[in-house]
Image (cartoon, rainbow, N blue to C red):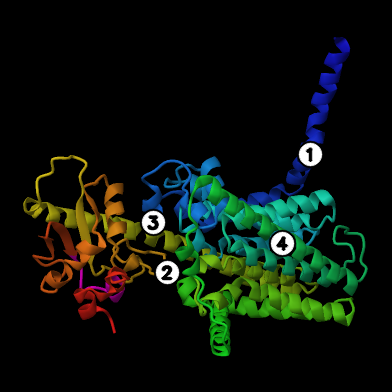
């Protein structure tokens, strides 16, 4: 018995070592100042979202039900489904989703700089905040239902790249698991991972290390080893993508959910023609330039500082590559990898005629951070100082933009609630035209004609989903409006069916638009709100087969 107790005591002492907790504790202790700094940067960059709340696009879809949403499985995002089940069964809430998202961004930037180099210094403190605060990320973090998952995807993807520094079976397995989970959370993580690896390869060439896990060696990186690493990575990434796809198919079968083909293929519009390729390539290059140099469509205003920072750091990185102590073949490969890193995040534009939601270009922030890292770790004090000043200035501007975006989101939601109250008051005035409800849970059909938008001002910023109104998104979507009503406790209305909509088209032509008297009325037992004339997309939506030959469609279908 005594021996048994002694064995248990020895095992108890060994548990921290067996689980790797001692190494983890020492690793955190060695990097505690960098971690504190990055968490402070995350708080500055997304402070308004921490201390406020606004109902945002898609939140109304998740606000009615607890538990994981099977829609994630239908979209191929089984990882988001599991996070929804494990971390946040209710994502429509203040603070916690933002906290998880920002912590994920911080850990992503932390592992990223460690993946680039085992030397700690100024470059970490200058580059990592760019990866955390870049406003391109905010387009993904905008969604409370998705943003926290993107944060987790950042953390696991960069952790996987960091683990590739150690060419062991265990690190390879763990990296594959990390990549699989990241892709399962959000498919746009795939080009992000590719960009991260390309940047890591560029770093290994610049630092001229043959063994990336050793800080004591300073040998030239051989071309054979470089090719071996690239092939090794492609096998791991291909395996991760295949495993993720297999898990997605398995989840579809286990949950009896149909794959949402329309959602996925809504972002795939490529054609195998030379005209498509060259026209889309030209648009992709132009759009990519805007992403990397502070275009106002993504950065609120033309951010000239970012343009200077991008051009300067790219030039420094290219110079460091071509002057590295490796063979010319290795250096040329490094240049190709740098171009691949820059191109990877924006290559998704080629799949959809040069247009993709900004939230899918997650790798842009890490490419910018990587270039800053390479420039800030150069041997020139002048270049390091100039890079640091520009990067800090850009981080400040990024934080201003992100908090301005958050403020606009909240103000748009509050304005939508005010508009909803006014509309509901008008509906209530006409309620006598509707039949008396015998069932307290019965719902009246509602149709929204046209759409309503707020004049863009410093308060109402409009950038894709940023500052989006429930009365604008979808060019007048009764489904979103009725779900917005439900978040206000009003459950008396449902979106009108296609047949009900078609029965209203002629009658609504003579109705005045909001806010004039008669813009809210009851027609054929349907509540009609006319914000303005029909949007062409509304007509197209109700005139899909088999209704395309309906007399109303033939008369009003856009030419």
**What residue is shown at x 47% (from left), y 46% (from top)?**
95
Residues under labels 2 and 3: Cα distance? 13 Å
**What residue is shown at x 65% (from left), y 70% (from top)?**
367
Residues under labels 4 and 1: Cα distance? 26 Å
Q: Nearer the viewer, residue 121 or 454?
A: 454
Mark 1, other Cα within 10 Å: few <14 / some 14–19 / many ≥20: few
- Residue 384 lies within the magenta run: no
Q: Which mark is residue 237?
A: 4
Mark 2, other Cα within 10 Å: few <14 / some 14–19 / many ≥20: some
The image shows residue 274, relative to residue 342, as above or below, that is below
Q: Which residue is mark 2?
A: 464
Residue 503 drawn at (x, y percent) = 17, 66
Q: Secondary structure at mark 4?
A: helix
Q: Nearer the viewer, residue 519 or 492?
A: 492
- Residue 535 lies within the magenta run: yes
Check whether the beta carbons of the residues at disc 4 and disc 2 lie within 8 A of each other: no
- What range of the chain is rendered magenta? 530-539
Check whether the beta carbons of the residues at disc 3 and disc 4 lie within 8 A of each other: no
Question: In which quadrant will I find the C terminus?
Answer: bottom left
- First in residue order: circle 2 vs circle 1: 1
Q: Which residue is mark 3?
A: 56
Report if residue 54 is visible in the image: no
Q: Secondary structure at mark 3?
A: loop
Mark 4, other Cα within 10 Å: few <14 / some 14–19 / many ≥20: many
Using residue 409 as the reference point, say whether residue 276 is left or right of it.
right
Q: Secondary structure at mark 1?
A: loop
Using residue 108 as the reference point, say whether residue 276 is left or right of it.
left
- First in residue order: circle 2 vs circle 3: 3
Q: Which mark is residue 20?
A: 1
């Amino acid at each position: 018995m005594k021996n048994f107790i002694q064995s248990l005591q020895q095992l108890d002492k060994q548990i921290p070592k067996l689980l790797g907790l001692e190494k983890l504790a020492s690793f955190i202790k060695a990097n505690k100042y960098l971690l504190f700094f990055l968490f402070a940067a995350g708080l500055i960059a997304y402070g308004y979202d921490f201390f406020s709340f606004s109902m945002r696009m898609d939140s109304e879809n998740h606000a009615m039900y607890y538990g994981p949403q099977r829609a994630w499985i239908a979209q191929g995002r089984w990882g988001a489904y599991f996070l929804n089940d494990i971390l946040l069964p209710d994502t429509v809430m203040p603070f916690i989703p933002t906290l998880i998202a920002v912590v994920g961004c911080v850990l992503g930037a932390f592992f990223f700089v460690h993946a680039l180099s085992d030397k700690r210094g100024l470059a970490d403190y200058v580059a990592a905040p760019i990866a955390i605060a870049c406003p391109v990320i905010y387009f993904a973090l905008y969604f409370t239902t998705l943003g926290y998952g993107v944060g987790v995807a950042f953390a696991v993807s960069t952790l996987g790249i960091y683990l590739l520094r150690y060419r062991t079976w265990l690190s390879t397995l763990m990296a594959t698991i990390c990549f699989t989970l990241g892709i399962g959370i959000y498919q746009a993580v795939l080009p992000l991972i590719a960009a991260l690896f390309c940047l890591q390869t560029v770093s290994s060439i610049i630092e001229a290390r043959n063994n990336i896990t050793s800080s004591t060696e300073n040998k030239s990186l051989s071309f054979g080893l470089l090719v071996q690493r690239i092939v090794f990575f492609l096998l791991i990434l291909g395996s991760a993508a295949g495993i993720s796809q297999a898990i997605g198919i398995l989840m579809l079968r286990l949950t009896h959910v149909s794959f949402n083909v329309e959602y996925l293929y809504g972002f795939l519009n490529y054609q195998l023609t030379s005209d498509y390729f060259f026209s889309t390539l030209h648009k992709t290059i132009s759009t990519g330039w805007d992403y990397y140099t502070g275009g106002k469509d993504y950065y609120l205003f033309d951010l000239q500082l970012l343009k200077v920072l991008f051009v300067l750091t790219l030039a420094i990185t290219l110079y460091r590559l071509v002057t590295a102590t490796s063979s010319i073949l290795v250096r040329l490969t490094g240049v190709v990898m740098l171009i691949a890193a820059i191109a990877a995040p924006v290559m998704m534009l080629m799949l959809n005629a040069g247009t993709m939601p900004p939230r899918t270009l997650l790798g842009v922030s890490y490419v910018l951070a990587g270039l800053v890292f390479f420039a800030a770790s150069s041997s020139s004090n002048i270049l390091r100082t100039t890079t640091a000043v520009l990067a800090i200035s850009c981080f400040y501007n990024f934080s201003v933009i992100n908090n301005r975006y958050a403020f606009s989101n909240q103000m748009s939601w509050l304005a939508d609630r005010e508009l909803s109250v006014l509309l509901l008051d008008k509906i209530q005035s006409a309620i006598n035209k509707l039949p008396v409800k015998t069932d307290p849970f019965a719902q009246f059909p509602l149709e929204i004609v046209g759409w309503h938008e707020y004049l863009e001002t410093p308060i109402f910023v409009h950038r894709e989903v940023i500052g989006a109104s429930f009365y604008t998104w979808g060019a007048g979507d009764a489904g979103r409006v009725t779900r917005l009503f439900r978040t206000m406790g009003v459950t008396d209305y449902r979106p009108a069916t296609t047949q009900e909509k078609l029965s209203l088209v002629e009658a609504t032509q003579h109705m005045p638009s909001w806010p004039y008297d008669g813009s809210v009325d009851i027609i054929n037992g349907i509540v009609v709100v006319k914000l303005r004339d029909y949007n062409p997309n509304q007509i197209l939506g109700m005139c899909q087969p088999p209704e395309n030959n309906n007399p109303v469609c033939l008369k009003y279908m856009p030419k």
